Image (cartoon, rainbow, N blue to C red):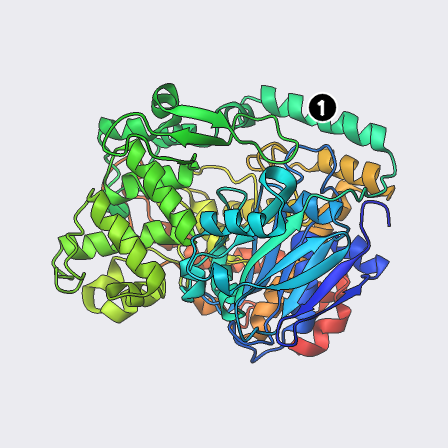
Amino acid sequence: MLGYAGRWAQVDLTNHSVDYIELPDKMLRDYLGGTGIGARLLYDRVQPGVVWDSPENHIVIAGGPLNSTHLAGAGAFSVITKGPLTNGATSTQANGFLGAYLKTSGFDGLIIHGSSASWVYLYLHDGIVEIREGELLKGLDTLASEEKVKELIQRPGLKASVFSIGPAGENLVKFAALVGDRGHVASKNGIGAVLGSKKLKAIAVERGAYKTAIHDAERMSALARSMVEQTRNDPKSGKTFNRGTSHLLGLYFNTGLLPYKNLTSNVIGQEYLKLGGEYYRERFELKRDSCWACPSGHCHVIKVTEGPYTGFMGDEPEYELFAGMGTLIGQSDPGAVVMLSNLCDRLGFDGNEASWLTAFVMECFERGLLSVEDTDGLELRWGNVEAVRSLLTKISKREGIGNLLAEGVMRAAESIGGEAKNLAVYLKKGYAPRGHDHRARWFEMFDAATSGTGTIESIGLNIPDAFSPAALAEGIVHGKPRNFVDSLVVCMFPTRTMTSAGVDHLVEMLKAVTGWDYTPEEAFRMSLRVVTLLRAFNSRHGIRPDVEYPSPRYGSVPVDGPAQGKDVMKIWDETLDQYYQLMGWDRISGRPKPDTLQNLGLDAIVKDLY
């Protein structure tokens, strides 16, 4: 198959064995790679009753047919597993280089199961996978682990891509992430905890010499160049391409989208504008640190040059952490955001869950629901950066109050009890949302609630005022090509798919690489197949429609600001009705209907659900 290495490694960590397989051509055509292939493998190999930390749970780490080409952002990869926050499926992506290096080392992906008796790491090179002793990596943060592994395999700098779990993953924090390439994060639904349960500390992939055969390399290169120029000059995506995502903070400032002090208000002081890229990029020292084949001005190594954290160096945070470790916790120092964001990465956290959790605890402290004795002496008041720093470290080690908070926002609120349950921001499936106040972005709140991946599942979502249930449901369905993008597997920023559901240009690239007669209609159908398969997996594993709701605070009516008085809950159930009807899912059980499965080529799983 053109565009594919044609080789997958199956890693059994219990027996420390590896075997190599090819996947059927039809599976590649139907699911492409990344999230698609991962969803198929997860459904087939992880049976109902298998819990997230069982040796029988599988982790799929997969690239796609466009990886290692000249396409900007084609170094991304997907991780698919059963995660601890939802006890259901998750799919999450990271950029950087690992997806490209998988191909150059002769692989399309890894299928990992079992549990090692001692800590190990994987080393992929020259078409083989080595399972290496990793006890000496235990306790290291993700940056130190990356550097140590590169030293052990004697592949410094960009000669290898290394992703690892930090102390959070080792200690089975339920929102632990997989972090590598100096700050790129595959973060959702606790995949780092799944790796920790298997005692798999790191995955290292060498930049090899293997070249994947391409149907029309010249056309592919021309399409890739054209895409970059169109993205750079696009009125929407061009700003992010050239200036990174932190400029969005200023854009969202007066829209009601910027989350502030755990959603207690939407009236935000002007001092918080210092968190936007317009301010700190003019003052801090930045050095470009781009991903595979990407010429954008998106990613940098950054050095703080003012404030109490002057001299700190790390990865430039995305918008979501400037909001999460800035406005959301009531502090306006961009240098502090850089420090706290990098601390999240190094400890191995999902920054979104960590941010909402911290803001929740701070509000509980401010209201007297938690005392200094409860917080191990930490004065967790709004804006207390050093208290947050200590709290995050405690959570990563499950020390003191950190043990309770390591369960994530929803479970922490349930454990604290009382009024605290009404303050926490989360989806009732078990995870916190992305870094916006979705009470002013209803599309994304609904999408996050109904998603099968542990995070948002659609693209090109508009910023609504208030829509009819039918329009809201149709908008979410219209954005479903996201799973096509995540199966290719490519970055959403240079490909313009963060702000648009149009994938025609990616379809043309897929055709140039594989030689297939592929269409945008097939891309949309393929994406619906993946969405429906993930829904079927979650249905078999006990997830029902009654958890597709926001928490009381998350679904509350804003008391001030641009979205004041807007009540999403008035149309919630009707929107779910409309959405289920459009998707062809049973409204009572949540399961895809038999004719829906058959129409998407999923006939074989009808018997599993009915």
Instruction: Please tell me which residue is depicted at 33% across the width and 40% down the height of the picture.
Output: 339
Q: Is residue 483 visible?
A: no
What crowding class fits label 1: few (fewer than 14 Cα within 10 Å), some (14-19), or many (20 or more)? few
In the figure, residue 397 lies in which quadrant? bottom left
Would you place residue 353 above or below residue 40 in this image? above
Query: As drawn, is 506 to the left or to the right of 423?
Result: right
In the figure, residue 246 lies in which quadrant? top left
Query: As drawn, is 400 to the left or to the right of 579?
Result: left
Residue where numbered disc 1 is placed: 226
Instruction: Please tell me which residue is depicted at 68% across the width and 67% down the height of the picture.
Output: 11
Q: Quadrant of the C terminus?
A: bottom right
Locate residue 361, reporting x and y percent.
24, 56
- Closer to the camera in the image, 210 or 417: 210
Query: As drawn, is 249 to the left or to the right of 8?
Result: left
Would you place residue 537 above or below residue 583 in this image? below
Which structural element holds mark 1? helix
Locate residue 344, reporting x and y percent.
38, 49
Locate residue 483, reporting x and y percent.
64, 50
- Closer to the camera in the image, 195 or 367: 195
Would you place residue 598 above or below residue 249 in this image? below
Amino acid type assigned to the residue bearing label 1 in the image:
Ser
Q: Is residue 231 visible?
A: yes
- Closer to the camera in the image, 293 or 438: 293
Locate residue 456, reporting x and y percent.
51, 50
In the figure, residue 398 lies in which quadrant? bottom left
